[in-house]
Image (cartoon, rainbow, N blue to C red):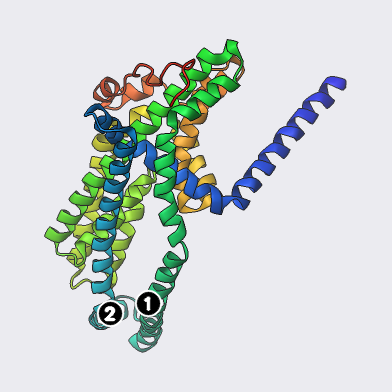
C-alpha cells in the first residue's frame, strides 16, 4: 500500500511539474520566443562566423559581419515578398472579376449536373466573394499593424544572436563549472552533441527551404500562376514544419488557382507539381540534408508539432523539433532515461529502410568535440 502511494505521489508531482512548465511557457511566450529564435539563428550562422574567424578576423568583427549578412538576406527576401503582396492587393479588382466569372461557371455546372438553381448559388457565392475582398484590405492592414507592433522583437533578435555567439564559450564554461566533477565528461558530451545537431539541423533545414523556394517559384511561373515568387517563398517556408509542410504550403497557390485561375487545368497542374515537390522533399532533400541528424520517431514528432502549436503557435511548431532532439540526446546519456530516448528516437534500421539511407548515414556521422577545454576560462 505504501509503495502504491509513493508511485501515485511521484506521478502527481510529475504531472504538476508538466502543467506548471507548460503554463510557464505560455505566460513567458513574449520573452522566450525571441530568445529561442536568437538561439536558432545563432546556430544557423555559427559556421559562417567560425569561417571568418579562421580567416584572421577578430571574433567581434566576424560575429558582426555574420549578423549583418543575415539581416541583409532576410531584409531582401522580405522586400521581395512585400512587393509581391503589394501587387496582389493592387490587383484585387481584377481578381474579384475573375472570381465572379469562375463562380458563375461553377454554378452553371452544378445546375446541369445536380439541378440546383443558379440564382441561389450565385447570390450566396457572390456575397462570400464581396465579404472576402471587402475585408482583404482590412486584413492586410491588421497584418502590417501587427508586424509594426512586433518591430522591437524583430530588432532584438539580432542582438540576441550577437551576444549568444560572442558568449558561446562563456556559457559552456559556466555549465562545466556548475556540474560536479564526476559529470563533466558527460555534460561536455551532451553540449557537444546538442550543438552539433542544432547547427546541422537548422543549417540543413535552411538549405532545403532555399532550394524549395527556387523550385517552387520556377515551377509555378512555368505553370502560369501569378505571383509565383510570393507563393513559392510562402510554401517553401512552410517546410520548416516536418511532414505536413509541403501540403500546408500548397494550400495557398491551390486556393488561389481555384478561385482566381483562368482554367481548371491550372489547378490540376498545381496539384501535380506539389505532389512532385513533396516526393522530392520527403525522399531526397530532407532525408539526406536534415533527416539523419535528429533521428526522431515520426509519431512523437507529430505529437510534438501539435503540442508546440498549442503552446507557441507557428513559432512552437518551428522550434519543437530541435527541442525534442536535444531532449533525446540528454535522455541518451542517463541510464534511467535511455528507454525514453529509445521511445522517441529512430533506429538505424529505420534509417537504412529509406532507399537513400546509406547516403544519409554517410553525411550524418558524429563529429568530434568542438568546444574548448572546459578548464580554460574563455575571454
Q: Residue furthest left?
A: 222
Q: Residue 42 location, x and y as percent?
A: 38, 39
Q: Nearer the viewer, residue 223 or 324?
A: 324
355 over 242 or under it: above or below? above
* Residue 136, label in figure: 1
Give residue 285's position: percent from left, percent from top. Answer: 25, 37
Q: Is residue 1 left or right of residue 268?
A: right
Q: Quadrant of the N terminus?
A: top right
The front one of 146 and 277 is 146
User: Which residue is found at the position 48% from the left and 43% from the top?
Assistant: 36
Asked whether, in this view, residue 158 is left or right of residue 1, the answer is left
Q: Within the image, what quadrant is residue 219 found in?
A: bottom left
The image shows residue 189 at horizontal and vertical percentages of 46, 18
At label 1, counting other C-alpha atoms closer than 10 Å, the crowd grade (few under 14, some 14-19, many 20 or more) is some
Tag 1 or tag 2, which sits nearer the N-term?
A: 2
Secondary structure of the residue carrying numbered label 2: helix
Between 364 and 193, the residue placed more toward the observer is 193
Q: Is residue 135 above or below residue 234?
A: below
| Residue at x-position 64% and y-position 46% | 24
Mark 2 neighbour density, 10 Å: few (under 14) some (14–19) many (20 or more): some
| Secondary element at image label 1 | helix
For residue 139, which quarter of the picture? bottom left
Of all residues, the one furthest to the top in this rendering is 182
Relative image position of residue 23 (x, y in whole percent):
65, 48
Residue 73 appears in the rendering: yes
Q: Which mark is residue 92?
A: 2
Amino acid at each position: 500500500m505504501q509503495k502504491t502511494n509513493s508511485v501515485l505521489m511521484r506521478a502527481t508531482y510529475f504531472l504538476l511539474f508538466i502543467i506548471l512548465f507548460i503554463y510557464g511557457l505560455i505566460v513567458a511566450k513574449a520573452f522566450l520566443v525571441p530568445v529561442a529564435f536568437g538561439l536558432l539563428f545563432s546556430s544557423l550562422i555559427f559556421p559562417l562566423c567560425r569561417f571568418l574567424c579562421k580567416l584572421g578576423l577578430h571574433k567581434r568583427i566576424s560575429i558582426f559581419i555574420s549578423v549583418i549578412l543575415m539581416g541583409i538576406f532576410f531584409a531582401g527576401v522580405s522586400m521581395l515578398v512585400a512587393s509581391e503582396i503589394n501587387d496582389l492587393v493592387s490587383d484585387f479588382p481584377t481578381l474579384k472579376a475573375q472570381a465572379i466569372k469562375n463562380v458563375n461557371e461553377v454554378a452553371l455546372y452544378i445546375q446541369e449536373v445536380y439541378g440546383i438553381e443558379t440564382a441561389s448559388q450565385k447570390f450566396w457565392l457572390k456575397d462570400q466573394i464581396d465579404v472576402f475582398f471587402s475585408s482583404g484590405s482590412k486584413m492586410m492592414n491588421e497584418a502590417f499593424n501587427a508586424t509594426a507592433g512586433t518591430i522591437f522583437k524583430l530588432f532584438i533578435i539580432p542582438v540576441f544572436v550577437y551576444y549568444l555567439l560572442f558568449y558561446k564559450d562563456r556559457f559552456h564554461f559556466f555549465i562545466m563549472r556548475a556540474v560536479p566533477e564526476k559529470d563533466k565528461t558527460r555534460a561536455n558530451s551532451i553540449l557537444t552533441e546538442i550543438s552539433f545537431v542544432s547547427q546541422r539541423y537548422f543549417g540543413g533545414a535552411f538549405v532545403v527551404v532555399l532550394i524549395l523556394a527556387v523550385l517552387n517559384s520556377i515551377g509555378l511561373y512555368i505553370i502560369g500562376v501569378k505571383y509565383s515568387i510570393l507563393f513559392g517563398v510562402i510554401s517553401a517556408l512552410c517546410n520548416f514544419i516536418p511532414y505536413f509542410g509541403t501540403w500546408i504550403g500548397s494550400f495557398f497557390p491551390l486556393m488561389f488557382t481555384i478561385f482566381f485561375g483562368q482554367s481548371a487545368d491550372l489547378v490540376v497542374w498545381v496539384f501535380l507539381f506539389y505532389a512532385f515537390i513533396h516526393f522530392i522533399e520527403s525522399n531526397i532533400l530532407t532525408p539526406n540534408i536534415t533527416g539523419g541528424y535528429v533521428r526522431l520517431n515520426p509519431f512523437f514528432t507529430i505529437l510534438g508539432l501539435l503540442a508546440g502549436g498549442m503552446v507557441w503557435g507557428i513559432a512552437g511548431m518551428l522550434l519543437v523539433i530541435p527541442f525534442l532532439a536535444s531532449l533525446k540526446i540528454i535522455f541518451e546519456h542517463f541510464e534511467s532515461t535511455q528507454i525514453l530516448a529509445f521511445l522517441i528516437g529512430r533506429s538505424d534500421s529505420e534509417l537504412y529502410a529509406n532507399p537513400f539511407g546509406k547516403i544519409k548515414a554517410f553525411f550524418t556521422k558524429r563529429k568530434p568535440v568542438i568546444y574548448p577545454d572546459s578548464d580554460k576560462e574563455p575571454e
